Image (cartoon, rainbow, N blue to C red):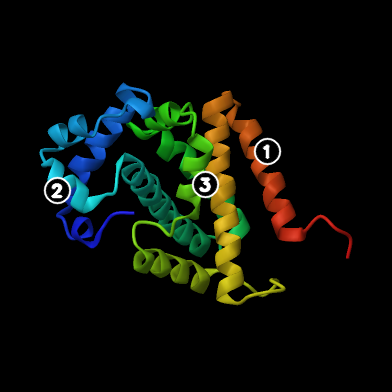
């Protein structure tokens, strides 16, 4: 994930690097993505790039994790709107994720990267990360925890809640990637997602 030096950059400079990376990921298959092209289009030096990120995989992890944090922020607001109901808000989260992915370059970037031969490994790295920064990720998680109605949860401690949030976000990411890779209809993707939420909410074994 990005270094503290990157996190301190002005938002305009961060955006320039993100946009340059997305353009390059769309232009060529991921294995052919050129760091030289990215730094040229972003207006930074090669030395600066390596003070921000380890490599191009690290940069891509940042872009997807940054997007995930923006979705979690939307998710938190949706939970408030629905009186603390995490499950209804989670369905809206998938709707927003689909809209988010289809806007601008993100959708095209995802289409390109899901064809990458090591995509499954890269996806696992992205899903396993803590977001743009651990502190920021924790702040979003804590906000979501505070506004969620946990009265019916059999486990309502923060650690268990963090696992649940990670599982739901994983389902969202899988749904988007499945849509891109197999060109499933949105309705079918949403149907399968609701079934996953049902299992997470109520379990699959008889009590």
* Location of mark 3 (residue): 124
Task: Give the secondary structure at mark 3.
Answer: helix
* Location of mark 2 (residue): 48
Image coordinates of residue 183 in percent, x first then y, are 56, 24
Q: Nearer the viewer, mark 3 or mark 1?
A: 3
Label 3, residues with CA under 10 Å away: few <14, some 14-19, many ≥20:
few
Q: Is residue 4 above or below residue 49?
A: below
Query: Can residue 149 be spotted in the picture?
Result: no
* Location of mark 1 (residue): 191
Going from N to C along the chain, the mark reached first, 1 or 2, is: 2
Image coordinates of residue 130 in percent, x first then y, are 43, 60
Residue that appears at 40% across and 63% down: 137
Image coordinates of residue 1 in percent, x first then y, are 34, 54
- In three-dimensional space, the C-alpha distance between marks 3 and 1, rounded to whole angstroms, equals 24 Å
Q: Is residue 85 above or below residue 11?
A: below
Q: Are marks 2 and 3 in contact (CB under 8 Å)?
A: no
Q: Nearer the viewer, mark 1 or mark 2?
A: 2
Instruction: Please name whichever residue, 86 or 131, is drawn nearer the observer in this view of the structure.
Output: 131
With 206 as the anchor, is 86 left or right in this view?
A: left
With 207 as the anchor, is 151 left or right in this view?
A: left
Q: Are marks 1 and 2 in contact (CB under 8 Å)?
A: no
Going from N to C along the chain, the mark reached first, 3 or 1, is: 3
């Amino acid at each position: 994930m990005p270094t503290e030096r990157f996190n301190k950059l002005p938002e305009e400079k961060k955006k320039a690097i993100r946009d340059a990376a997305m353009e390059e990921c769309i232009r060529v298959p991921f294995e052919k993505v050129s760091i030289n092209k990215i730094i040229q289009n972003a207006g930074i030096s090669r030395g600066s790039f390596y003070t921000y990120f380890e490599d191009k995989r690290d940069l891509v992890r940042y872009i997807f994790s940054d997007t995930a944090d923006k979705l979690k922020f939307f998710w938190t607001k949706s939970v408030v709107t629905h009186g603390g109901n995490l499950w209804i808000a989670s369905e809206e989260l998938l709707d927003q994720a689909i809209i988010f992915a289809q806007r601008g370059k993100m959708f095209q970037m995802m289409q390109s990267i899901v064809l990458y031969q090591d995509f499954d490994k890269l996806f696992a790295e992205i899903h396993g990360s803590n977001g743009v920064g651990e502190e920021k990720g924790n702040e979003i998680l804590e906000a979501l925890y505070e506004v969620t109605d946990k009265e019916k949860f059999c486990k309502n401690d923060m650690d268990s809640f963090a696992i649940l949030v990670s599982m739901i976000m994983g389902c969202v990411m899988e749904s988007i990637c499945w849509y891109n890779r197999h060109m499933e209809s949105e309705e079918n993707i949403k149907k399968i997602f609701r079934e996953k939420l049902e299992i997470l909410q109520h379990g699959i074994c008889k009590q």
